[in-house]
Image (cartoon, rainbow, N blue to C red):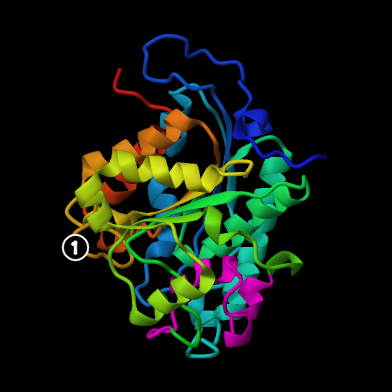
Amino acid sequence: MAVVNNLTDLQTPAQMPVPSQYSQGGTQSLPTRRICVLGVPLDLGASRRGVDMGPSAVRVAGLEARLESLGHQVTDGGNVAVEIAETRSTGDVHARFLNEIAETCSHTANAVIRALSDGMMPLVLGGDHSLAAGSVSGVAEFYRRRDQKIGVIWIDAHSDINTPQTSPSGNVHGMPLAALLGLGVDAGLAPLTGLLGYSPKIAPENTVLVGVRDIDAAERENLRRAGMTHVYTMRDIDERGMRAVMEEAIRAAGQGTAGYHVSLDMDWIDPEDAPGVGTPVRGGVTYREAHLAMEILADHGHLLSFEIVEVNPVIDEHNRTADLAVELACSAFGKKIL
């Protein structure tokens, strides 16, 4: 198959319209989709426990029913198997539980490939952000087999581009973007970097960071090493506005690609609105800004896959953060005010 360099030339099976009873009401103007929900209850990549319960919390918040109310067809693919921390040795303190995380990411990648092959769009629920090394690898491999590449919009308070040599904590949830971009092979990250037998999975010119506000000094150097030029901090959002930032992010992620994967870490949002996250950082986006970003993504219609990570019910307030995660997913999948 020839390489598709124009987003308008490609319509994936997950984007094809399906029969729907939802025909009126004005809150869903996009083609309906077949969505496969995949839970990855992984908490091995973080110091703070509890994000393994994130997939359950988001399901309890009514994800499936609320997406179906928009006309989408939703299938729950269950959870990817994850090892329990108490049954395993942490291994290298510079990359704790790396082998176990890589195994989970391998399973996640294969589950994502199966969903896409069945004509469904993966909606992955985390779990800590290290799982993205698997989900993005799966999407990238699916389109690689079609001689196409993907973009990634990484929406997060953190850049997640540490390696075992640069990480101050040894927590692998701060390393998945480094693995996907091909960093860390010589720095002890090979089990993640080499998932599915090749590296890198994504190109820096099609990879975008949005809303970062907590970056280690060594990560700044890693961003330069990786050739990352599309990095939008909270200052960019403050000064230029969410619309300008998201339009540029979508343009960069979509240039010469089949579309883009969106990786949404709930710590991107200010802790006042999303208190139940793995690593809260003050000064995040507001409730309304977060919805606007998702609505802009929906308007463009080139979303290939989506994930929501780092929901931690243990420190949440009456499941507020999981409920917000569901609201944002609905906005990303076409819910409109009018």
Disc 1 secondary structure class: loop
User: Which region of the structure is painted magenta?
Assistant: 167-194
Q: Is residue 80 visible?
A: no
Disc 1 residue crowd, few under 14, some 14–19, many 20+, Cα 10 Å: some
Given residues 9 and 279, the one toward you in this image is 9
Magenta stretch containing residue 22, yes or no?
A: no
Residue at 32% across, 41% down: 244
Decide: is 335 above or below 155: above
Residue 58: % across, % down: 40, 47
Magenta stretch containing residue 173, yes or no?
A: yes
Count of numbered tags:
1
Residue at 37% across, 14% down: 26
In the displayed structure, does residue 228 sit left or right of residue 195? Answer: left
Given residues 93 and 30, the one toward you in this image is 30
Residue holding disc 1: 282
Q: Check the picture and name the quadrant holding the C terminus.
A: top left
Amino acid type for the residue under numbered disc 1: Arg
Residue 74: % across, % down: 55, 33
Residue 98: % across, % down: 57, 79
Decide: is 259 above or below 10: below
**Quarter of the view holding residue 281:** bottom left
Q: Is residue 145 visible?
A: yes
Q: Check the picture and name the quadrant holding the N terminus.
A: top right
Residue 235: % across, % down: 23, 57
Residue at 39% across, 40% down: 247
